[in-house]
Image: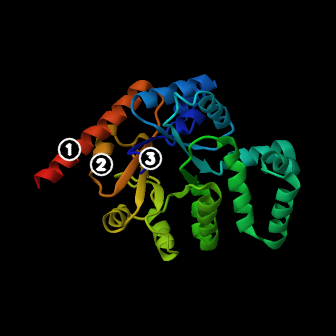
Amino acid sequence: MIDRILFGDNQFFAVNHISDEKSRAQSIQFKNDDAIVKTLDHARDAGLNTFMCTTHDRISAICDVIRRDPEKYEDYKIFPCMPYAHKYANAVTELGITGTIKQYVPGNLFGSLFKGGMAVLSKDYISLIELMIDAEMKMFKGINTPVIFLQNVITDLLIGLKAEEILMAYYNHVKKKHNAEPGFITMNMPKLYEILERNGVENPIICSSINKVGFRMSGSIEAYEQVLRTKRGRFIAMQVLAGGAIPPEEALEYICSLPNIESVLFGASSKRNIESTVSYINHFDEKQMTTAMAS
């Protein structure tokens, strides 16, 4: 079972969809890894034991902290989200294609290169996807990673290309090789659900922008709500504040009123904002439960 509230990492890497000024402030605030760990501990103190994060290079140092203190982080989980596209783009710029392959390809170098090389020559993108997953997962060795997500930049590209076989290759590889549940991040939840359902995936894990103003939601709000009402899945709502366009209380009351939202993903820079967000979600969940019992 996925926790009701998940803690995200956008704030650590200066990702803000509304304010460049806030992005710059966060970049300064989290320039040291200790600041990231401190905020994660604030989230843990508020009851949040799942960290959903990209495979940004700095996450490797956070994983080292977790591995060094297994007792403290005994029940802690990380949901990796891959690939972190900027990492590869920057690496190619700095190291070249060969240098990037040497840095990120896991396991036996020549065996992996052979597999990857054949993939390029034969346009076997499925093999490339498998290599990418294995490379990205290296930093999480020894850490509990029960769900592994495909980032929306790839998910939605594959949806647009109608490359369903590659989506399913990712799904199958994560289950078989990494003994984890595959998750998908998307900006088009109704379309992705249709594809997964058609390919026999039951009760999928889908993380998508869900908010009352349709921010970064491809398709209508009504289409999303229809899926939530009528389909079986483990749906995770992200960007619930619409990048700051909706006041937290109003945004979270709407999210908690929706059926079939298993989890809410959010990020915050301060202990106060973490605690207030958790408090709002708990309050509106209790309100929904009370209403349901009374009806």
Residue 89 versus residue 173 in the image, above or below: above
User: What label sits on residue 256 in the rendered view?
Assistant: 2
Where is residue 285? Give x, y as percent: 26, 44
Amino acid under label 3?
A: Gln
In the rendered image, is residue 63 in sight? yes
Considering only order in the chain, which callout, 2 or 3, is on the residue closer to the N terminus? 3
Report which quarter residue 65 is drawn in.
top right
Q: Quadrant of residue 118?
A: bottom right
Picture disc at residue 239: 3
Q: Secondary structure at mark 1?
A: helix
Mark-to-mark CA distance, 1 and 2: 9 Å
* Relative height, residue 145 to residue 11 (above, below): below
Q: Which residue is farthest bottom?
A: 198
Q: Are marks 1 and 2 in contact (CB under 8 Å)?
A: yes
For the point 30% across and 37% down, the residue is 280
Q: In terms of depth relative to the viewer, which is nearer, 89 or 130?
A: 130
Q: Earlier in the sequence, mark 1 or mark 3?
A: 3
Image quarter of the C terminus: bottom left
The crowd level at tag 2 (other Cα within 10 Å; few <14, some 14-19, many 20+) is: many
Q: Which label sits on residue 287?
A: 1
The kind of residue tagged 1 is Lys
Q: Amino acid at mark 2?
A: Cys
